[in-house]
């Protein structure tokens, strides 16, 4: 994209608006790197669905068992993590959770974001009510 110096700021803003915040974020994410970075032990790894499957050394979701936990990075960069144990969801996607265990800052940011969204929605709902005049509930009983 070409931007003139004068419209640089506006250009930056508009390109940011067009960008999907989650679509490109994990594209360059390196699961193998992340695991070793955060001291998550990997027992073994093998090719899986165009990506890599990592068998984790111990279950990050439960202290009751060590086996069964895994993390996958698919060929398209998407990450899936879970544990085969029923008590851990039986292989359901828990990557978000796992990541936030090791990146509390990220969890805090997400909570903060969710809080903002909540406030935003509340404000919107309020604004809607006010603009529609719905504060007047109308007749409480139906005549007749
Ligand atoms: Zn488990």
Image (cartoon, grey):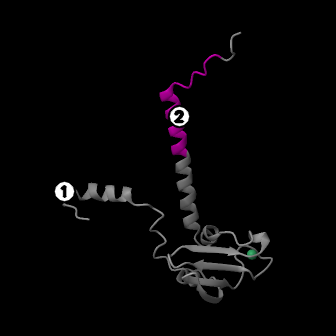
Magenta stretch in the rendered image: 119-139
Taking the magenta stretch, the answer to whether it contains residue 125 is: yes
| Mark 2 Cβ and ligand 1 under 8 Å apart | no
Give residue 126's mark: 2
In percent of width and height, residue 137 lies at 61, 22
Q: CA distance from mark 1 to mark 2?
A: 38 Å
The numbered dot on residue 6 is 1
Task: Label 1, secondary structure: give it.
Answer: loop
Q: Residue furthest top?
A: 144
The C terminus lies in quadrant: top right
Q: Is residue 106 magenta?
A: no
Residue 7 lies left or right of residue 142; in this view the side is left
Magenta portion: prevailing SS class: helix
Instruction: Please rate how many residues cluster around mark 2, counting C-alpha atoms within 10 Å: few if below 14, some from 14 to 19, many from 20.
Output: some
Residue 84 image point, x, y percent: 74, 76
SS at circle 2: helix
Nearer the observer, 101 or 25: 25
Determine whether the beta carbon of the residue marked 1 sits less than 8 angstroms from the nearest atom of ligand 1.
no
> Which sits in the foreground, 50 or 137?
50
Please report the residue visible at 79 percent of the width from the left and 79 percent of the height from the top.
65
Q: Which disc, if any, is residue 73?
A: none
- Measured as percent of width and height from the top left, residue 77 is found at 51, 76
């Amino acid at each position: 994209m070409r931007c003139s110096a004068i419209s640089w700021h506006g250009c930056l803003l508009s390109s940011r608006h067009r960008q999907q915040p989650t679509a490109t974020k994990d594209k360059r994410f390196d699961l193998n790197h992340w695991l070793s970075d955060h001291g998550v032990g990997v027992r073994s790894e093998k090719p899986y669905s165009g990506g890599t499957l990592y068998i984790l050394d111990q279950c990050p979701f439960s202290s009751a068992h060590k086996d069964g936990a895994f993390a996958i990075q698919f060929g398209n960069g998407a990450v899936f993590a879970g544990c085969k144990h029923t008590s851990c969801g039986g292989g359901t996607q828990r990557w978000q959770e796992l990541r936030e265990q090791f990146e509390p800052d990220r969890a805090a940011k997400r909570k903060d974001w969710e809080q903002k969204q909540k406030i935003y929605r509340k404000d919107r709902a309020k604004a809607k009510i006010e603009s529609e005049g719905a504060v007047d509930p109308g007749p409480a009983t139906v005549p007749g």
